[in-house]
Image: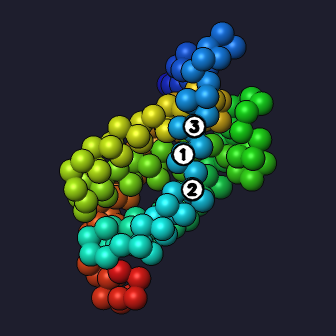
C-alpha cells in the first residue's frame, strides 16, 4: 500500500515536471542540459583539462574522471539489479536503446558528484557553477521524459555519497597511479 502510493506520487510529480507540447520555447534548453551531463561529453572535457593543465586543475580533472568511471560501474550495477523501465516517451532514443533502465539516474549522480568534488577540490566559483548546473541537468532529464523524479533524486543522493567517498579515497589512490594525478 505505502509503496503503491509512493510510486503513484512519483509518477504524478514526474508528469507535472515533464515538458508539455505547449512548452516548445523551453525544449531547446532542456535538451541542452539533458545532454550536457552525458558521460562522453564530461569525460572528454575532463580529459582536455587534464591534458592541458598542471597543478590543482590537473589533479581535479583526474579525480573527477576516475570517480566518474567508478560511479558509472556502481550506477550500472544498481540499474541492472533494480531494472526500472524508463518512462514512456519519444525523446532520448539513444538512452532508451543503450540503457533501458532508469533508476538511478546516472546523469544526476555524475553531475552532482562533479559539483561536490568541485566544491571540495577546486575554486569556489567553479563549485558554485557546477552546483547550479547539476540540478538543471537532473530536472531536464525528467522534463524530457527519460527519468522519473525519484530516479534523479536517488542519483543526487548517490552522487553526494560518491563524491565524499571518492574524495576520501583520492589521497590513497594518487600515490598508486602518479602518472594520472
Q: Could you classify mark 3 by the number of other residues whose Cα lies within 10 Å: few (under 14), some (14-19), or many (20 or more)?
A: few
Q: Nearer the viewer, residue 156 or 35?
A: 35
> Label 2: which residue?
41
Q: Where is residue 117 in the image (x, y as percent from the top left)?
A: 31, 58
Q: Where is residue 87 in the image (x, y as percent from the top left)?
A: 69, 31
Quadrant showing the N terminus: top right
Q: What whole-number distance in Å separates the C-alpha atoms at marks 3 and 1?
A: 6 Å
Label 3 secondary element: helix
Figure quadrant of residue 135:
top left
Quadrant showing the C terminus: bottom left
Q: Are marks 1 and 2 in contact (CB under 8 Å)?
A: yes
**Residue 4 visible:** no
> Label 1: which residue?
36
**Residue 172 visible:** yes
Q: Position of residue 121 (x, y in %)?
A: 25, 62
- Residue drawn at 35 percent across, 88 percent down: 178
> Looking at the image, is mark 2 or mark 3 earlier in the sequence?
3
Q: Position of residue 175 (x, y in %)?
A: 30, 88
Q: Are marks 3 and 1 in contact (CB under 8 Å)?
A: yes
Q: Give the residue at the far left of this rendering.
A: 124
- Residue drawn at 57 percent across, 56 percent down: 41
In the depicted structure, whether residue 35 falls above or below residue 46: above
> Label 3: which residue?
32
Amino acid at each position: 500500500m505505502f509503496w503503491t502510493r509512493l510510486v503513484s506520487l512519483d509518477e504524478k510529480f514526474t508528469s507535472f515536471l515533464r515538458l508539455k507540447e505547449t512548452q516548445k520555447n523551453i525544449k531547446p534548453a532542456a535538451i541542452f542540459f539533458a545532454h550536457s551531463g552525458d558521460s562522453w561529453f564530461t569525460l572528454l572535457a575532463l580529459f582536455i583539462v587534464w591534458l592541458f593543465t598542471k597543478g590543482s586543475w590537473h589533479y581535479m580533472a583526474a579525480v573527477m574522471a576516475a570517480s566518474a568511471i567508478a560511479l558509472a560501474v556502481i550506477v550500472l550495477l544498481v540499474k541492472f539489479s533494480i531494472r526500472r523501465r524508463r518512462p514512456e516517451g519519444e525523446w532520448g532514443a539513444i538512452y532508451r536503446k543503450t540503457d533501458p533502465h532508469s533508476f538511478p539516474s546516472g546523469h544526476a549522480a555524475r553531475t552532482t558528484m562533479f559539483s561536490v568534488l568541485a566544491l571540495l577540490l577546486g575554486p569556489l566559483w567553479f563549485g558554485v557553477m557546477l552546483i547550479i548546473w547539476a540540478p538543471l541537468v537532473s530536472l531536464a532529464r525528467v522534463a524530457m521524459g527519460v527519468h522519473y523524479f525519484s530516479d534523479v533524486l536517488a542519483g543526487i543522493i548517490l552522487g553526494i555519497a560518491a563524491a565524499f567517498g571518492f574524495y576520501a579515497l583520492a589521497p590513497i589512490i594518487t600515490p598508486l597511479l602518479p602518472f594520472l594525478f
